[in-house]
Amino acid sequence: MPRRWVPNVITVIGLVAGFAAIGAGFLHLSGLAVLFILGAALVDSVDGQIARRLNISGVARNLDLLADLISFGIAPAVVAYFLDFAQLGWNGCILAAVFPVCGLLRLLTFSKFQVKTYYVGLPLPGSGALLAIWAYLAQSMPVVLQAMVMLVLAALMVSTVRLPRVRLVKRSA
């Protein structure tokens, strides 16, 4: 396999994890869905680093955007819908749809706001992982509180609030 394909293969693994999370959500296996989303987050952190090291862009960038939207926009919204908002019927669907729409807007405008020392708004992978964990842990909380947390996360993605970059793994130069 050519080296330039490596980041794409890793991204596809994350994309499959996102689809698996959606499937698990529909099957009401919410714990498994959250694990798939967290697995996609781990894979997402690796594919970007490899793509930068190999100086790869173009198709890899577009594939990464699609994988992010599915794994961290749609999948967490599906989990939140089935855990927290299904009892609201169509209102719950519309409420859950706000999150991936804001995630898409974030992805479409992200390249304009790349700064090395801080994030402008909350990145979609972090927001999606937080929503999935929150939805799973807060199932017994009032639906109004659950909706407020999801809407705050969605709003932070499209905001211009400066958030510090936190690196769990130090990049090598």
Image: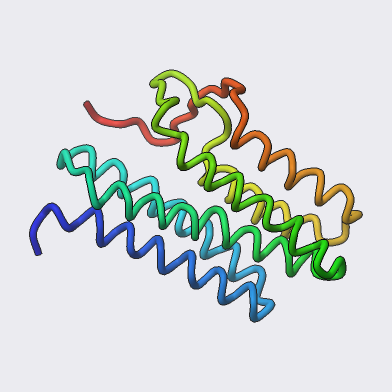
* In this rendering, position of residue 170 left or right of residue 68: left
Residue appearing at x 64%, y 56% in the figure = 132
Tell me where residue 156 sits by quadrant: top right
Residue appearing at x 38%, y 45% in the figure = 45
Tell me: residue 63, above or below residue 110.
below
Residue appearing at x 47%, y 42% in the figure = 107
- Image coordinates of residue 58 in percent, x first then y, are 22, 46
Tell me: residue 109, above or below residue 14.
above
- Image coordinates of residue 143 in percent, x first then y, are 88, 56
Q: Quadrant of the N terminus?
A: bottom left
* In this rendering, position of residue 113 left or right of residue 23: left
- Image coordinates of residue 11 in percent, x first then y, are 33, 57
Residue appearing at x 44%, y 31% in the figure = 167
Q: Which is more toward the observer, 169 or 119?
A: 119
Q: Quadrant of the C terminus?
A: top left
Q: Which is more toward the observer, 123 or 134?
A: 123
- Image coordinates of residue 100 in percent, x first then y, are 60, 53
* In this rendering, position of residue 115 left or right of residue 81: left
Q: How is the image coloured?
A: rainbow
